[in-house]
Amino acid sequence: MTVTSGLAQVGKSQLALNLALELVRRGRWAGLFHDQVEVGSIDQLLSLPQQVFRERHDGEGQPAEVLRRGYQGADIISCRLPLSEWAHSNPVQITHCINELDIAEGYDDLVIDTSGMSEHELLACCLASDIVMMVVTPDPVSQAEAFALLRILKLNGYVGMLRLLVNKVRYAVDASDIHQLFAQRARSYLEMDIPLLEVMLEDEHIPLAESSRQAFSTVFPESEASACLVVIADEIENLPQSVQPTSVRAYWEKVQEFLAMPLLLPGNAVLGTAESVGGAGPAV
């Protein structure tokens, strides 16, 4: 599942991190992927060992492509090769990355945090995902940018489950009003349904946890935010299951395909043409 939005600073990384931890508490193998772009948002949230990619000594002589760090039972995963370079890198190296992004047992859940990703990488991760959690806040700009992202996903034929999560609201009724307006626009202009997944209420414990560089659900398990998180995980577990669940390897192979092809944008524009390889492309 991909946790995303059309705007920065809406709380994607916090939600992705704590959701992965809640899934672990339920006895599941959970991985949390964040792209290796400068200092990742997950690294800013957590006090993790600052390991570096090291050469493997397994006789193959190949460097380790994936950095996997443990936190409260979850794997925090990043790749030596940023997603922005996958489209024009050695296919052998990409295959090596994909092989290392899974574990022998296979993850039950892989949560993708799109924080810091550029447009093409973000869209590729969403289009390849079974579930896309669209995060908005009471900020109207956040809602407008999320709607623009929703429009692009429709243009490119997204077929998975879309769910809206309203973050940083004081009262649940506020989230209901935001969802009602957002869903109405989606039906009217895009002919799409986007149900409300759940609500994350504003909670003073979240910035307190951030200041200590810990997950709020770990250091404040009795907080209101942690209670919201439990309900969010319940709703995810109750979502319809795919007839044939996507493996981690199959997911990253689909991401690779989307990164290698141009994606449609409104106004007959495209993102990721041959002329724009290596560039950021048009804004979403």
Image (cartoon, rainbow, N blue to C red):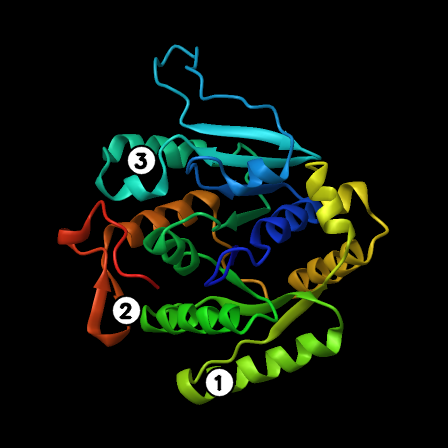
Inspect the image, locate mark 3, and give the three-letter code of the amino acid beneath it. Answer: Ile
Inspect the image, locate mark 1, and give the three-letter code of the amino acid beneath it. Answer: Arg
Residue position for label 1: 185
How far apart are the alpha carbons under marks 3 and 2?
26 Å
Q: Quadrant of residue 86?
A: top left
Residue 274 image offset from top left, x and y in percent: 14, 52
Residue 220 visible in this rendered orientation of the protein: yes
Q: Residues within 10 Å of mark 2 (few under 14, many from 20)?
A: many
Residue 152 image offset from top left, x and y in percent: 35, 69
Residue position for label 3: 94
Q: Residue at x 60, y 78 (%)?
A: 179
How many marks the image carries: the answer is 3
Q: Residue at x 81, y 58 (%)?
A: 224
Left or right of residue 49, residue 101 in this image: left
Q: Secondary structure at mark 1?
A: helix
Q: Residue at x 52, y 36 (%)?
A: 77
